[in-house]
Amino acid sequence: MSMQICENKIMVRSAPCDASPEEVGYDVSRLSFLNQHIQALIDEKRIWSGSYCLWKDGKVFADAAIGGLACPWMGRTTFEPDTLFEIQSVGKVFTALSILKLMEDGRLYLDQPVRDWIPEFDEGDFREIKVLHLLTHTSGICALEGGYPQDERRWWEQMDEADPEHTWLGAVVKTGLHAKPGEKWIYSVVGYVILGEIIKRASGMEAEEYVKKFIFQPCQMIDTHWRKDATDAQLRRYNVANETDLAMVKAAQQYGIRRMAAPTYPTWPGIPDMAGGQTSTCREMMHLAEMILRGGTYRGQRVLGKNALELLWTNLIPEHVRDVSFGRNAGIRYGAGMPIFSAEYDREQILTEGTIYHEGAGTSVFLVDRKEDFAAMFQTSFRKEFDWDYRAVKGMASIIWSGLK
């Protein structure tokens, strides 16, 4: 149950927390500024809502939401702290952690050629792709659509849609590479789908089931799920923000609530859904952050060992490799599945040096700061699908980190 507080004419809905900002040494005035920042973006009609959950020294000290939904849904009109939203590519963190777990269990290793698991890769430059390259977006494999416009490739067009399970990997190979493995940093969605296939073959179980069993369950992430697995009670708590959401609400009103459980992006039978798109809350993502910051254990349940987690903070990108995605040409520091903040390369936000993080389609960001024993998850529901605004993403992160004393 959230509590609604009117703060400078801003309606802030806040869930009970473990501590106050003052108790963990956080400047409470920066939370007021953050709320004003969110409300300004709402007033400008850039976003429908903004929400955040902040954790420090083992305690959640802020869990708040501002704004509303694009239309009423199941009696709800406001975005609440327990509203479920798609975390998009933040879900790649689950894939990366699964790879690290399989590595510490002796099932695979980062410098292992992908062709050991995927025979289709045993040709041309694909033979040189390692698990590490997929994990760090340096494989050269097909970029996210629009992410490398000078060489647009659509691997799915090479696939037999009548038999996706047996033709998708061959389709990726037919599509070819943007660059030789290890040469450039190019953000790839299908690279993480391939990691899902490796998880499946290395573990002997579906990749999604592996994540549920070895990450969601021990981290007590009972609300985090793929849409197809949602209960009706969870569907009633879904966010409604963009054109796709509105179309799904319309279909649900006509054909029933289960229409809200349909994926909001292309998926195919037999192809691992491991590039993101899970649904969660800001609060529940703090369970994951706590596990990472507590050496791989959540409330007594072991998930990973500390040495495996150390690879999240270890830069695995050679100095000569440049980030060339989305028109950039910059250096980058990247660990086993997450960027590592460095002011040398990133002048768009002010974070503690070495903070690891992942953005999801501009609508959500997950950040973990080991030096300050601090973590945050926030979302900003853009009114236009695939929109992006510096203030609602990088600006939000800078404001949040400015409260650290």
Image: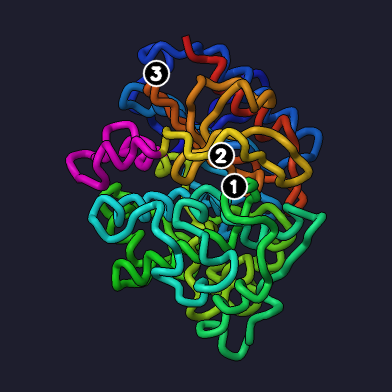
Residue beneath disc 1: 360
Disc 2 marks a residue whose amino acid type is Val
Which quarter shows the N terminus? Answer: top left
Q: Earlier in the sequence, mark 1 or mark 3?
A: 3
SS at mark 3? loop
Residue beneath disc 3: 20
Furthest residue toward left: 300
The range drawn in magenta is: 286-311
Is residue 357 depicted above or below 188 in this figure? above
Residue 222 visible from this viewpoint? no
Q: Is residue 290 left or right of residue 175?
A: left
Q: Earlier in the sequence, mark 3 or mark 2?
A: 3
Question: How crowded is the residue under tag 3: few (<14 C-alpha within 10 Å), some, or many (20+)?
Answer: some
Question: How crowded is the residue under tag 1: few (<14 C-alpha within 10 Å), some, or many (20+)?
Answer: some
SS at mark 1? strand
Question: For the point 52% across and 15% down, which residue is it?
Answer: 403
Is label 1 or label 3 in front? 1
Which colour assignment does the render follow? rainbow
Furthest residue toward bottom: 162
The reply to whether callout 1 and callout 3 are in contact (CB within 8 Å) is no
Residue 112 visible from this viewpoint? yes
Q: Is residue 211 left or right of residue 352?
A: left
Disc 3 marks a residue whose amino acid type is Ser
Disc 1 marks a residue whose amino acid type is Gly
The reply to whether callout 2 and callout 1 are in contact (CB within 8 Å) is yes
Residue 141: percent from the left, percent from the top? Answer: 62, 61
Q: Nearer the viewer, residue 21 or 386?
A: 386
Residue 329: percent from the left, percent from the top? Answer: 74, 37
Residue 36: percent from the left, percent from the top? Answer: 67, 23
